[in-house]
Structures are given as structure tokens and as C-alpha cells.
Amino acid sequence: MDYEKFCNKILEADSKIRFAAVYDEWSNRIAGGLREGIESLLPERQEKELVNLSVFDWKARKDMSKALGIVSYTMAEYEKVKRFSFYLGQEHLLLVSSEKDNDTSKVADEIIKLYHEN
């Protein structure tokens, strides 16, 4: 899959999505990033820490999938944004953030649809 193209399609699909990026299991960014013209709410060090925590959580959920089934996505709602983690198989993690007032189900459904189309 062309992850750069995938991340661009996510950003094009919803103007309230601020960030879409794919990471590997070592927290290396493979593709994507912040929407042009938007400033990050986190300093670079905190952003890296949040990615590391997301990857750690992803690895833990992979272990739980044996009993509960495969996770499609997780979501956290903060005061300023919503953050989504989508599990792209065993090797890649998609992190997405959107404006807080965005419809959670709409975002998740659209991203899952785009993933299956690609």
C-alpha cells in the first residue's frame, strides 16, 4: 500500500482531520503528517513520546487479540482534539487526530473504508 497516498486521502476526506501518519513497530514515521497550515499542539519531544506510547499500546493489544479478536481502532478524546489509532495489520499503525467536534463514527468509518479501498 502507498501509505503517503493513503494519508493524503484521509486529510482530503475530512477538513476537521488535523493529522494522519503511519508508523512502524519501532515508532518510525513511514508516511503522512500534519495538515498543511496547521500547527502542532505538542512540542516535538512530546509528540514522539505520544507515538511511542501509542506503539506500546498497539503491541499490547496485539497480544490481547488472541482472546478478544483483532482491534480495528481505539480513540481518546482530549479537551482540544480526538486521537485515533488504527491497526494496519501486524506491522503498521495509523495515528489520526481531528478537531474535537468531529463525529467519531464518521471519522472511523471513513478511514476504515479508505483503508479497504487501498
Image (cartoon, rainbow, N blue to C red):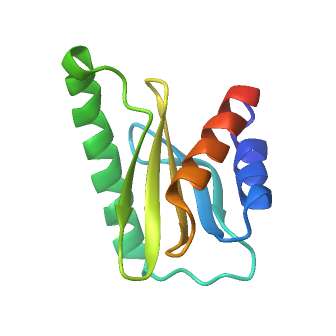
Question: In x, y percent, where is residue 44?
Answer: 44, 75
Q: Is residue 65 left or right of residue 2?
A: left
Question: In x, y percent, where is residue 84?
Answer: 46, 54
Question: In x, y percent, where is residue 12?
Answer: 80, 59
Q: Residue furthest top?
A: 66
**Mark count:** 0
**Foreground: 80 or 33?**
80
Question: In x, y percent, where is residue 115?
Answer: 66, 34
Give the residue drawn at x 54%, y 80%: 40
Give the residue drawn at x 73%, y 62%: 14
Q: Is residue 48 left or right of residue 53?
A: right
**Observer able to see residue 72:** yes
Residue 98 higher or lower than 10, as above or below: below
Q: Quadrant of the N terminus?
A: top right
**Foreground: 14 or 46?**
14
Residue 79 higher or lower than 71, as above or below: below
Classify residue 72 by image quadrant.
top left
Q: Quadrant of the C terminus?
A: top right
Give the residue drawn at x 36%, y 23%: 70
Give the residue drawn at x 47%, y 83%: 41
**Observer able to see residue 21:** no
